[in-house]
Image (spheres, coloured by chain):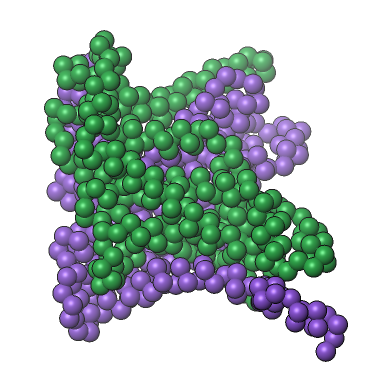
Chain colours: A purple, B green
Amino acid sequence: MTVQAHKVARLPWHERVGYRFAGQPLPWLLPVILILGFFYLYPVFDVFRFAATDVTLIGQDYEYTSRTIQQTITNNDLPFILWITLIFTAGSVIGQQLLGLIIAMVVIRAERRRLFGPTILRTTALVAWVVPGIAVGLIWQMLFSEAPFGGLNSLLRMFGISPVYWLSDPQMAMWSVIISNIWRGTAFSMVVMYAALKAIDPVLYEAAEVDGASGTQKFRFVTLPQLRAAILVNMILITIQTVNTFDAIIALTGGGPGRATEVISLYAFNIVFRNYDLAAGSVISVIMLMISLILSVIYALFLPKGDTT
Amino acid sequence: MTHKTRERILDVLTYLFMLVMFLFFAVPLLWLLSLSLRDITEVFLGVSRFIPENPTLENFRQVLTNSYFPMYLWNGLKLACLGAVGCLIVAAPAAYAFSRFEFRFKGAWLMALLAFQMISPLVIMVPLYRYMSALNLIDTHFAVVMVYIAVGVPLATWLLKGFIDGIPRSLDEAALIDGCNRFSVFWRIILPLSAPGIASAFIITVIAGWSQFLVPYLLLTRDDLMPIAAGIFNFAGTQNASTVQVLAAACLISVLPAIVVFLSLQRLILGSIMSGAVKG
């Protein structure tokens, strides 16, 4: 019995517990493990399990069968839904990335030249970013509306241009949804790109200057190569966000007109909560999980190595 | 063309681009404001009445005296705050451990935590709805708050870890030498010192909770329990073309708290997102 141990033994119970357990990570991590295990891991596990059954949302009994997977995968809707999701995601991600990069570059230039307005522009873009998804859908519905109060068409009318069927024409509706999503999400890319541009060593630009590079050449040979990793990571992050988009679309078009804007998250929602087909909805959820998982693995590969502290 | 003239031309182009972008981001919200201040006759005049001739607050009065709308606001605030408090209680100890301890697979654990962010709440809601029905927890705020906590924990842990990393380890060591155990170090030193980080993580989680739609929409059926995002979605379903100005007012009321909180704490929020989430 050392002096130290003797001292510990006489301490009140909570101090003893503190000495005994506080030096290990597990007690500290336990709450997170329990919460995520119960509300995330277990449901995800069950999604996989339900995909192999014929369970419905309301009934209690179900049996294991591979029929659901077969029927859902071979369903004629699925390729169409995936195509819609791809267009929506590609349009949003490319739009947000490009616009975010251009805004960040222009803002940095304006700051360097001490022009008026870069802060206002940044703040306005960020305000759009914090608007709740449902409200985004409702706001853009008021802008795209083909009624007299529809902002965009009434603007066109003022210039004598014939109205555009923003939400009632199936092909146009997809573009409308993409525009509203670019409005909402660009700020995130702008912030990431701004930070990445600021992190580029100014010496590189000075060297390019000495070599007599033009502005375009500086962008091509200095800025773009330096930003490559940031652009890739940013695009993966916003792709995952976009694939999982739900609120803004259900409030703007509800998946319509017809099924022109029914992306995969709306499809899963409709199958489970409109048709009560929990098993088929689980199969679709597994597909959504797979998409996110593949993207996450790519993302993890590109994160800076060794720096996990 | 001299260097100076070229810079001037570029300045003009910069201004033009900034103006166009400002309009793109600002006009949707200004349109909402414009519609919400009009009476029915001016609503149908479209853009020509962008600044209403007879602005009225009638729509706001109507929304705020509507039987359910104040309830939606209150439920939204209550659920977002409870969710954020729960989130921090769970996330803070974990953030401390990730910041101060060395253990096996730490990097993998942190990565796994980030992976949860990639899972759409819709995917987990599919089976969760079934459990909650089985446990008779449909139509309870308790169930909603628990799911909010789970959804918010990964980001909150990362944010707090980034903040605790910035507190010098020598403070922990000094306290340990003075006979504190790890729990009291955490309680007496780390928590008070990370107050700004905790505050910004709290605000970010509250704003995210305020926007939550799917979780409450599925777990709650009673209108008087709905938080704002789900409530306004139901509210929109009951409106028609002749009441668009009322819906605009309702929408504005629902986005305003998020915008005001964000603007007043913009620096804090952006700082913590940049240091915690983006740098990884």
Q: Residue at x 44, y 44 (%)?
A: B207
Q: Pinpoint residue B256: horizontal percent, then vertical percent.
A: 39, 33
Q: Pinpoint residue A143: horizontal percent, then vertical percent.
A: 26, 30
Give the quarter of the figure containing the N terminus of chain A. bottom right
Q: Is residue A164 above or below residue A98?
A: above
Residue B178 located left or right of residue B189: right
Q: Residue at x 57, y 34 (%)?
A: A105
Judge whether residue A282 can be spotted in this image: no
Q: Residue at x 31, y 14 (%)?
A: B51
Count of marks overlaid on the render? 0
Seen from the viewer's position, the closer of residues B4 and B38 is B38
Residue A150 located left or right of residue A10: left
Where, by quadrant of the figure, is residue B110 drawn?
Answer: bottom right
Q: Is residue A298 above or below residue B72?
A: below
Where, by quadrant of the figure, is residue A129 drawn?
Answer: top left
Q: Is residue B171 above or below residue A168?
A: below
Give the quarter of the figure containing the C terminus of chain A. bottom right
Q: Pinpoint residue B17: horizontal percent, then vertical percent.
A: 48, 24
Where, by quadrant of the figure, is residue A176 drawn?
Answer: top left
